[in-house]
Amino acid sequence: MPLTTEWGRYETLTTVSGLARSLMHGWPMDGRGDAYITALMVCEAVLSGGEDDTADHARETFIDAAYAAGLSVFDPNDGPDF
C-alpha cells in the first residue's frame, strides 16, 4: 500500500526499499529519534530477509517515525495525516 510523504517535495513510496531510502537520505536530522531508529531497523530486517518482520510492519514503523518527527504522511487507507 503506497504512502505519500509531503516534506520538501511530494514522494509516493511503494516498497520497503523506498521507505529505507527515504529514512536514510530524506529524513531531517532533528527527527532521528527512537521511532526513526526502529523504522530503519525494521526496514533493514525486511530487506535482508528476516523472518520476524514484514513489509506491513516496515510501513507501520515508518508512519510512527514520521509522526514522531512531525512529518506529514498521506495514507490512502486513512486519509491525510497532519
Image (cartoon, rainbow, N blue to C red):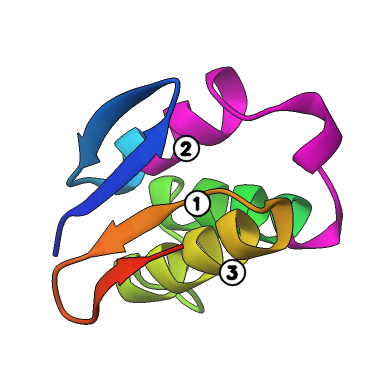
Q: Earlier in the sequence, mark 1 or mark 2?
A: 2
For the N terminus, which image quadrant?
bottom left
The disc at residue 43 is: 1
Callout 3 environment at 10 Å: few (<14), some (14 to 19), or many (20+)?
some
The disc at residue 63 is: none
Question: What residue is at 28 percent from the left and 58 percent from the top?
Answer: 74
SS at mark 2?
helix
Q: Earlier in the sequence, mark 1 or mark 3?
A: 1
Tag 3 and tag 2, C-beta contact below 8 Å: no
The Cα–Cα distance between marks 1 and 3, rounded to whole angstroms, is 13 Å
Question: Magenta span has 43?
Answer: no
The residue under label 3 is 64
| Residue 8, image x, y percentages | 45, 20
The Cα–Cα distance between marks 3 and 2, rounded to whole angstroms, is 14 Å
Residue type at mark 1? Cys
| Residue 69, image x, y percentages | 71, 51
